[in-house]
């Protein structure tokens, strides 16, 4: 499924725009957003990189229905867009009027014909309206002056706000009735048109995938390199001894289950880690990401991908400290919600860069890893930890509930209060924590979109597998 053309803003960018576009004088104002892009066979996402507010003083006309501004401010932005193959999006505010006006049509045609004249490449540019109630809609303006509506504008913050272009009324199929009864037809339809990426299809990934499919999510991107083994049977849903014998890849097991459910969810399956260009490109096309991995380097890379492409990211972690002889010291799990420009798994101290480096060595050069480990130069990565289905399913359910609460806010507490949600079954903890300070390492990547090498990681270059 190609998701069409969309725009994603991070919450901090949205807030900067909203306060500029709705000044107290009630007149229109305008801003330019430079956007990185995620372009693939799966869709074309514009991802806000840089917000440039056109000063009120540089507008020759500002009225409640019209703004005329000097395009001199565009020149350096055009050069920057040209150099980095980025898109320009003009954004202005409307109060109460939720469509483009005839004046907008005229000014967009004029503005964008000169913008296209400037550009060496053929990346698309667009125009977006932000409403005074926060809703956003937009369109791509083609070089010939024709308009095509953006399929979706998303604002990613504590809440995940999805504004879809109107589509033909398709009704709710019976398998979706109870979801629509709970959250309404609007949220059912959002779910039915979302693409969600899940990296890791084993312990916590398997129950996450099951819940996403049964919530009628439109499209899943599943990434996992491994096959089903006998040791997995205690916790991967729907796995059987026959799958072990057949060495069925975990992503294929998930695909088979979802196909047999026949509830309409499309599956893109990649039997690989996310250190694979094709898998990473499919993940970059997603609206939401779930990280269900043990590996530190995988988590680091997915956090990076979520920043480059401004995708909300849920990280799941479980931990059991047991002595192997029945003594259990600790049983706990955490759901981390990461938003673009907020704190990161790194700034939350889930791991250090040294651990990321060691995990990368373990994955790419096992011989060297063993040598350094044997010589005592590095601390080893955790392998084959204790794992049980009852803890995995609890944490997977918490993550799905976090996701749904952010897509369709319903809690008394604000969503910002549970950026981290910790559970300890051994110590009786069940508590949320707020986001904390932005991560300087990841915030600078927000909205970069497609670059070469992808994510600035040489192993994701063209030609690498
Ligand atoms: Zn307008």
Image (spheres, helix red, strand yellow):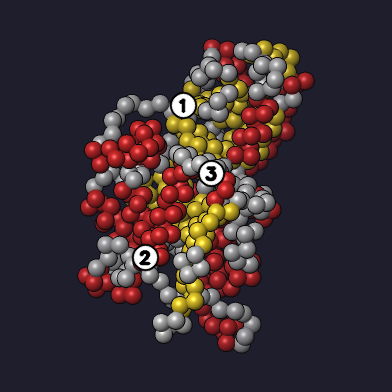
| Mark closer to the chain start, 3 or 2 | 2
Which residue is the extreme one toward the front? 428
Q: Is residue 174 left or right of residue 159?
A: left
Query: Which residue is disc 1 drawn over?
Result: 149
Q: Quadrant of the N terminus?
A: top left
Towards the viewer: 113 or 23: 23
How packed is label 2: few (under 14 Cα within 10 Å), some, or many (20 or more)? Answer: few
How packed is label 3: few (under 14 Cα within 10 Å), some, or many (20 or more)? Answer: few
Towards the viewer: 218 or 141: 218
Query: Which residue is disc 2 drawn over?
Result: 390
Task: Residue 73 in the image: state x and y as whole percent.
Answer: 73, 27
Q: Is residue 251 left or right of residue 70?
A: left
Instruction: Nearest to the eye among marks 2 and 1: give it.
Output: 2
Which residue is the extreme one toward the bottom? 375
Q: Which element is circle 3 on? A: loop
Q: Is residue 42 visible?
A: no
| Mark closer to the chain start, 1 or 3 | 1
Instruction: Nearest to the eye among marks 3 and 2: give it.
Output: 3
Task: Residue 261 in the image: state x and y as whole percent.
Answer: 24, 50
Spatial separation of the CA atoms under disc 1 and disc 3: 35 Å
Residue at the spot 22% in from the left edge and 52% down from the top edge: 260
Towards the viewer: 408 or 256: 408
Q: Which element is circle 1 on? A: strand
- Ligand 1 has an atom within 8 Å of the beta carbon of the residue at disc 3: no
| Mark closer to the chain start, 2 or 1 | 1
Query: Which residue is disc 3 drawn over?
Result: 413
Task: Residue 72 in the image: state x and y as whole percent.
Answer: 74, 24
Residue at the spot 67% in from the left edge and 34% down from the top edge: 16
Q: Is residue 405 visible?
A: yes
Spatial separation of the CA atoms under disc 2 and disc 1: 45 Å
Task: Residue 271 in the image: state x and y as whole percent.
Answer: 38, 62
- Ligand 1 has an atom within 8 Å of the beta carbon of the residue at disc 1: no
């Amino acid at each position: 499924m190609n998701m069409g053309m969309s725009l994603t803003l991070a919450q901090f960018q949205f807030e900067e725009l909203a306060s500029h576009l709705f000044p107290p004088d009630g007149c229109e104002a305008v801003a330019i957003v430079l956007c990185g892009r995620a372009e693939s066979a799966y869709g074309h996402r514009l991802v806000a990189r840089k917000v440039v507010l056109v000063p009120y003083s540089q507008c020759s006309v500002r009225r409640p229905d019209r703004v005329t501004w000097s395009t001199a401010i565009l020149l350096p932005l055009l050069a920057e867009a040209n150099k980095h193959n980025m898109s320009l999006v003009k954004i202005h505010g409307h109060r109460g009027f939720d469509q483009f006006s005839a004046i907008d049509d005229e000014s967009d045609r004029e503005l964008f014909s000169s913008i296209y004249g400037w550009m060496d490449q053929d990346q698309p540019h667009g125009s977006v309206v932000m409403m005074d109630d926060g809703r956003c809609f937009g369109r791509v303006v083609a070089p010939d002056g024709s308009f095509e509506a953006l399929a979706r504008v998303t604002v990613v913050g504590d809440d995940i706000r999805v504004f879809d272009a109107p589509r033909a009324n398709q009704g709710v199929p019976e398998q979706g009735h109870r979801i629509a009864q709970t959250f309404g037809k609007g949220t059912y339809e959002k779910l039915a048109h979302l693409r969600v990426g899940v990296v890791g299809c084993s312990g916590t990934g398997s129950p996450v995938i099951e819940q996403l499919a049964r919530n009628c999510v439109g499209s899943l991107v599943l990434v996992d390199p491994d096959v089903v083994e006998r040791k997995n049977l205690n916790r991967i849903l729907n796995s059987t001894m026959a799958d072990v014998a057949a060495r069925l890849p975990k992503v294929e097991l998930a695909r088979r289950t979802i196909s047999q459910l026949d509830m309409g969810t499309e599956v893109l399956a990649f039997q690989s880690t996310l250190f694979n260009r094709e898998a990473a490109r499919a993940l970059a096309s997603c609206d939401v990401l779930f990280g269900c991995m043990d590996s530190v380097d995988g988590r680091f890379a997915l956090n990076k991908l979520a920043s480059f492409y401004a995708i909300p990211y849920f990280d799941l972690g479980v931990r059991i400290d047991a002595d192997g002889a029945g003594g259990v010291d600790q049983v706990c799990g955490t759901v981390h919600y990461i938003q673009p420009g907020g704190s990161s798994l790194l700034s939350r101290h889930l791991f250090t860069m040294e651990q990321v480096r060691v995990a990368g060595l373990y994955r790419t050069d096992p011989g060297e890893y063993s040598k350094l480990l044997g010589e005592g130069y590095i601390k080893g990565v955790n392998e084959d930890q204790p794992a049980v289905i009852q803890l995995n399913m609890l944490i997977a359910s918490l993550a799905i509930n976090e996701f749904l609460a952010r897509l369709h806010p319903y809690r008394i507490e604000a969503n910002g209060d549970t950026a981290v949600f910790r559970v300890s079954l051994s110590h009786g903890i069940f508590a949320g924590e707020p986001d904390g300070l932005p991560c300087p390492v990841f915030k600078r990547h927000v909205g970069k979109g497609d670059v070469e090498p992808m994510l600035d990681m040489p192993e994701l270059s063209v030609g690498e597998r």
